[in-house]
Amino acid sequence: MTRRGVLRAFAATAVVAAPTYANAFGFLKGAGDIRRVKMYSGRTGERIDTIYWIEGEYIPEALAEINHFMRDWRTGGTINIDTRTLDIMAASHNMLETDAPYMMLSGYRSPQTNGMLRSKSRGVARNSLHMKGQAADLRLENRSVRQIASAALACSAGGVGKYSSSNFVHMDCGPVRVWGR
């Protein structure tokens, strides 16, 4: 058994000591006792550090807080963020073994915001999953794009886009695929 395997097995028995996951892939296998997101927004200055799932149950109040945090900061519009995307984000963060929060660059995007961004960049999809609350663009101060993308890819649960020149990773709960450098 690898060092990580031993640590994960220990974490499964020590859930009361800290908010951890029993298994980094818990959302895929139905395992794991606690799921948490920890982020800040460079656009609004807001921070969030919340447990949104405990022992098989999503916490509605925590999800509402996340929905507000991941709103379209340009319009103030909100949508229910797909919990599958949150699970990918949380599992990836756990695999990266860091306490640093994600910096969220983009969560939900209104159709108006997506259209405006699309008019300025070829890299913005016409039917972006951001408009459905199914995607997030994230970075970590102490991990590279390659490291973050590798963790997200290990989940085998959605799309992963590497944007090395802009220093962020796109994660979504759409079809499994990868792009970028």
Image (spheres, grey):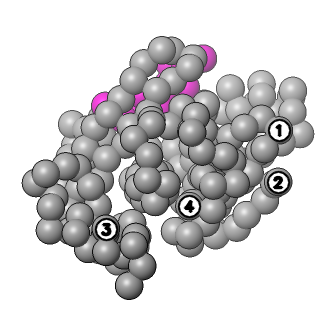
Q: Residue furthest bottom?
A: 1
Residue 181: which disc? Answer: 2
Can you identify the residue that label 3 sits on?
Answer: 7
Location of the C terminus (image quadrant): bottom right
Do the residues under discs 2 and 1 have CB atoms within 8 angstroms?
A: yes
Span shown in magenta: 65-77
Gap in angstroms between the C-alphas marked 3 and 2: 31 Å
Who's the residue at 87% across and 27% down the image? 120
Badge 4: few (under 14), some or many (20 or more) residues near its Cα, within 10 Å? many
Gap in angstroms between the C-alphas marked 4 and 2: 15 Å
Who's the residue at 64% across and 70% down the image? 176
Label 2 sits on a secondary structure element that is loop
Q: Residue furthest left?
A: 16
Name the amino acid, label 1.
Ser
Badge 3: few (under 14), some or many (20 or more) residues near its Cα, within 10 Å? few
Name the amino acid, label 4.
Ala
Do the residues under discs 3 and 1 have CB atoms within 8 angstroms?
A: no
